[in-house]
Amino acid sequence: MAIGTLLYEGKAKKIFSTENPDQVVQYFKDDATAFNAQKRGTIIEKGVINNKVSERLFRLLEQGGIRTHFVERLNDREMLTKKVRIVPVEVVVRNVVAGSVAKRLGLKEGSRIDPAIVEFYYKDDALGDPLVNDDHLRLLNVATPGVLRELREMGHAVNKVLTPFFTERKMQLVDCKLEFGVFHNKLILADEISPDTCRFWDVTTGESMDKDRFRKDMGKIEEAYQEVLARVCG
Ligand code: TMP
């Protein structure tokens, strides 16, 4: 696989062209940021772990009938994916109260949310990725009502496949952030699914096994990421 030019560099990944106009390479970095990049750091081997965890979860979701951008994992840090036009909406699915929803609504962390809820955030670093509703996204010309309905349905569908998979591995999927893209006029799941983009709590101890350990300076960050890799891919 001949890697082409750098098309885009984000906070945690780089995207390179390939000789196939329909495919790109995602390179996973160890760089970690939080709070809209006000906090920066490195999580050793994070790129390798997120690449492998994402591969496993994309394969699982494809088996569950969900279209994803995954093509193949090329090596430790690189994944070949379909080249999509990213929809600038972060689709957050929540099964348990944590993070921003606890703060915003004054809810107790750890309370179950059943059935799961879906939230939309407008992907715009300058605005700090604000929480938006369907009308805002229509006002911004980001998505039609049909696309928003599909995003919500796909968010729930992904959650239904992932939740039992993690339960079997003694992890609670608290919430996850999903991104979708358009490929040949169809919406497909893109980006990554990893401890950077989900919250996982150990079922036995309740401990965080995800990027919250970095966000909140909880320590044992690398150990938690390695444990997620072991449980998901082991
Ligand atoms: P939140 O509770 O801070 O809104 O986060 C919800 C989920 O989204 C959680 O699993 C972490 C993930 N997330 C990202 O992947 N990127 C982000 O920029 C933020 C704020 C959250």
Image (tube, rainbow, N blue to C red):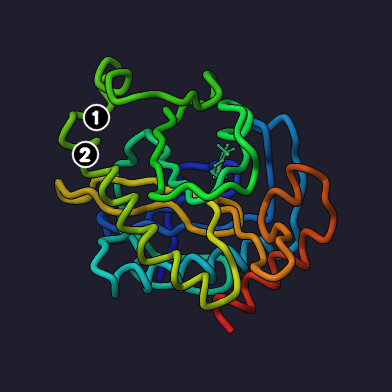
- Which of the 4 image quadrants contains residue 132? top left
Q: Where 201 sits versus 12, above or below?
A: below
Q: Can you tell me which quadrant of the image ligand 1 is in? A: top right
The residue that disc 1 covers is 143
The yes-or-no answer for disc 2 within 8 Å of ligand 1 is: no
Q: Amino acid at mark 1?
A: Ala
Question: Residue at left 39%, top 58%?
Answer: 159
Secondary structure of residue under mark 2: helix
Picture quarter with the C terminus: bottom right
Q: In the image, is 46 to the left or to the right of 93?
A: right
- Say which of 45 and 34 sits in front: 34
Q: Are marks 2 and 1 in contact (CB under 8 Å)?
A: no
Furthest toward the bottom, the residue is: 234
Q: Left of 5 or right of it: where is 141?
A: left
User: Which of the two marks, 2 or 1, is nearer to us in this view?
Assistant: 2
Residue flagged by tag 2: what amino acid is it?
Arg
Q: Nearer the viewer, residue 143 or 150?
A: 150
Q: Residue 144, position in %: x, y?
A: 18, 29
Q: CA distance from mark 2 to mark 1?
A: 10 Å
